[in-house]
Structures are given as C-alpha cells and as structure tokens.
Amino acid sequence: MENPFTGVVVRATGSWYDVLHDGTTLRCRIRGRLRLRGSRATNPVVVGDRVTCETDANGDHTITDIAPRRNYVIRRASNLSRESHIIAANLDQALLLVTLRQPATAAEFVDRFLVTCEAYKVPVVILLSKSDLQVPEALRSFRAVYEGIGYRVEEVSAATGQGVETVRELLRGRTTLLSGNSGVGKSTLVRAIDPGLDIRTGEISESHRKGRHTTTFSTMYPLAQGGAVIDTPGIKGFGLLEIDAAELWHYFPEMMRTGRGCRFYNCTHTHEPGCAVVEAVRSGEIALSRYESYLKILDEDEKYRK
C-alpha cells in the first residue's frame, strides 16, 4: 500500500474511523490537530469525507487530512448546544423518510430537514414510508403540500414492495443520505432494496409508539447496483445552525417565490404591512403548517444565532 493513501470514510464512531481504500476497509484514528481547527462541529471527520491517511511502522493507520467538502447535512448537537453535528458529507442526494402515523413525523421536523438541505444544496426526495399503514386522505394532503412546493414525494412500503423499485433506481450510482425519525423504517427499506446488506431493524415501542434506536453510528453501505447509501441513527430533533435569521425564508422555496412581492425588501414575513407571504398564507397559497414551521424556527433558534 502506498503511503500516504486516500480513501472515503464509511463509518465514524467518534474514536475510530473506517476508511474505504481500493476496495479494502481500514480502521483509522485521526491526527490530534484535526480536532483543533476552530470548528464548532463535535465530529471533525464524518461519513462521506474524502481523507488522506498515513501508515506508521507498526501498521497503524492515521487520518492526516480532510479534503474540502462539496456539501453536507448538519444539525445542532443537542437542544441546549451551540455546537453542531455533521451527519454526512459529499452527498448526491438525501431521501427523507416520513410517516404520518405509527409513528407520526412532525411537520416541523420535515421542514427543518428540508431547510438544511436547501441551505447546503443537497437535493431531497421525500419518501412516505409504511404507506400501507397510512390513512389515504392524509397521504394525499401531505403530497399536495410538498409536491406543490416542488419536492418529489414517493410512497413506499417495504412490507408490500410498493415503491421499492422506484427507490432502487433513485439510489443507483449515487451517494445518498437516508434519514428520518426513529421507527420510520429506514433500515427495513434498505434491506428490501438490497437484501445482501446486514442492517439491523427494530420494531416500534408499544409504550411510547416511538421507534427504538437500531442504528448507533452513521454508516455508508455500498449497493449491489452501484452507489452507496448512508444509514443514520434515528434523529429525534433537528435544530438548525449556521443559518442567519434574516436568510431563513430563502430556504422555503414557496416563500422565496412569493416574497418578491413584499412591500419591504427586508421583510421578515412576520408583522410587516404589505407582506406577500402572509397574504399567501391567508389565501391558502402557502400551507399554514409550513408557515408555522418558519415561525417556530425563527423563535426557537434565534438564541443559537448570536
């Protein structure tokens, strides 16, 4: 093996990093200085990173450098933290799994995820998971909102096979982040797409009707048909970071389109007279649930942007 060598991080546990190099996965540590770059991220090396490594005389491998990231998906590290946690980097797309019941995915969670992907230029497809267990009218209402904005929405069910082939084609030849709350069926869907992958699955907790955490660390899995999928731990919350309050509405596509008609160029779309966005909400052109998500993000995250 050449020294140094390059590879892609396919698993990051916080202490050890699995790096794929020429078809071989090597266990690496990171050089200490990589932790001291002034980043607010809790994890300096993430799945999807392209890295340079060195091998010492004992045969131990060390990550010595990280190539610039093309994009990434980030969230606040915890509800009371100004630090960030990068979920994955260098993505071709993200697939967000959503369930409307068993368990129900909150609209605000969906919108926070979409805002982050808009901000970091990661294309998103929304997958309405466990479609066989959902109420048809609720599915139609959800699709009307998000397809109206411009997002692609697909209904999928690993149990019945609905949409599995569509998702398989979406994944082919691409590096894809698969994300969603615990219990929405991420690991089960990946197994349906590629039965050769050894990804654990878990049932819904009957006591709380919430998903049990079955994936501990983000992991990149190569797919038989080409491409790779990054399976993430079930995410409960998605606090935003690095997005200025004045720019937040830029990442709501329907508000971006409508906001050009506001009386004031610096309209916050909250209280100003002549606000085209508020008028569009009143008329039903913009979904009330989306506008409420916008207001909640403004209110709840303002203290983290100081």
Image: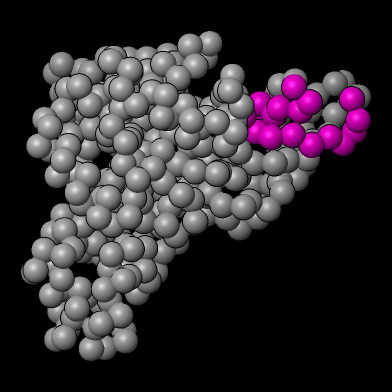
Residue name at image x 13 percent, y 59 percent: 288
Residue 139's quadrant in the figure?
Answer: top left
Residue name at image x 47 percent, y 26 percent: 168
Residue 25 shows in this picture: yes
Work out which quarter of the rendered image holds the C terminus and state it. Answer: bottom left
Q: How many labels were placed on the picture?
A: 0
Work out which quarter of the rendered image holds the N terminus and state it. Answer: top right
Provide the residue span drawn in magenta.
1-23
252 or 231: nearer the viewer = 252
Q: Is residue 226 magenta?
A: no
Where residue 179 appears, as percent x and y from the top left, is: 40, 35
Residue 210 shows in this picture: no
Residue name at image x 22 percent, y 26 percent: 131
Q: Is residue 62 left or right of residue 70?
A: right
Q: Is residue 185 left or right of residue 14?
A: left
Q: Is residue 173 left or right of residue 132?
A: right
Residue name at image x 26 percent, y 50 percent: 146
Where residue 161 appears, as percent x and y from the top left, is: 33, 17
Where residue 195 appears, as percent x and y from the top left, is: 48, 11
Q: Is residue 11 magenta?
A: yes
Where residue 290 appears, as percent x and y from the top left, is: 20, 57
Q: Is residue 235 above or below residue 1?
A: below
Q: Is residue 245 left or right of residue 41?
A: left
124 or 147: nearer the viewer = 147
73 or 133: nearer the viewer = 133
By what rule are the colours in the image chosen?
A: one colour
